[in-house]
Amino acid sequence: MCRPAKEVFPMSQKLQAEKRETTSRGQLQSIRRQGKVPGIVYGQGVKESTPITVDAKDVQALLRNNPRAVLELEVPGIGKKNVMLTDVQRDALSREVLHIDFHKINMNQSVTVPVRIEVSGKSAGEKEGGLLQLVLHEVEIECLPKNLPEAITIDVTALQIGDNLTVGDIRLPDGVRAALDADTVVIAVLAPQKERTEDEVEAMDDASEEAASQANTGAKVEE
């Protein structure tokens, strides 16, 4: 039985950037000390990659709120471009954002993006002592940029112990299709731990590993 997914569409987001000419390591470090993050813009209609800087506070807000959003990036002297964040480089120890990549997109061509899963309600199985397991935290979808949801919210109230919900069970918004195999498990309701057999525990681990291998953390834009 298909279970409805509530779609949440992103608000239009604008981001201000500045064009930069600096490329040496020392100059990039100086940019970061000024509270800015160096980056580049590339993609459709961009003859050469454009080096830019963005305020670090704006970058942190983007990463915290909706890193998959379609952005209207404005660079003085270049103009406004519709872009998506495609890569973030961080310091291995401090986790400081060192560099970001934006891909210019065509609003009339599809993108493939992982979108986070949000769970709504409490399953019937949990009320009976079962455990709800979110096997996938994101599901990869394909759609036009204008149809890109910020999240997919799934109502789990009907799930019983032993039930699972696959990618094929999710009723996606109009204009959006899943880019994962329809049989990929997204959510499962497990029996209480004391009642699980070794085979069930092993199957849970295998399902989690398979889901992790299929998940894609970066946005793909069709050229």
Image: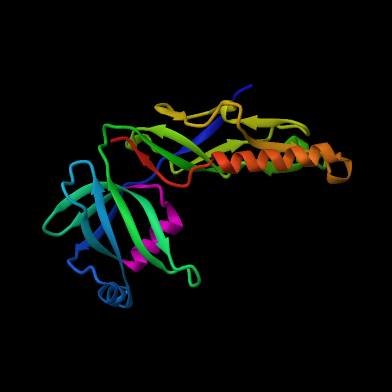
Q: Is residue 10 magenta?
A: no
Indicate the quadrant where residue 113 lies: top left
Placement of 145 over or under 36, stated as above or below = above
Residue 122 in the image: state x and y as whole percent. 69, 41
Answer above or below: position of 100 versus 167: below
Asked where in the image residue 134 lies, by quadrant, the reply is: top right
Residue at horizontal 36 percent and vertical 46 percent from the top = 11
- Whether 3 is drawn above or below 87: the answer is above
Residue occupying the far left of the picture: 77
Which residue is the extreme one toward the top?
1
Residue at 77% from the left image edge and 41% from the top image edge: 202
Residue plotted at (25% across, 53% down)? 41
Find residue 27 and report its horizontal and vertical position in percent. 25, 75
User: Which stretch did the figure color magenta?
Assistant: 55-70
Can you say which quadrant of the picture contains the N terminus?
A: top right
Seen from the viewer's position, the closer of residues 181 and 191 is 181
Q: Is residue 187 left or right of residue 178?
A: right
As for residue 56 lying within the magenta part, the answer is yes
User: Secondary structure of the magenta portion, mostly?
Assistant: helix
Image-quadrant location for residue 164: top right
Q: Residue at x 43, y 46 (%)?
A: 218
Please give left or right for residue 31 compared with residue 10 in the image: left
* Residue 50 x, y percent position in the rendering: 20, 56
Q: Quadrant of the C terminus?
A: top left
| Residue 204 rendering spot, x and y as whole percentages | 73, 40
Residue nearer the viewer, 144 or 53:
53
In the rendered image, the residue lying farthest to the front is 24
The residue closer to the viewer here, 31 or 155, is: 31
- In the picture as drawn, the residue positioned furthest to the right comes out as 194
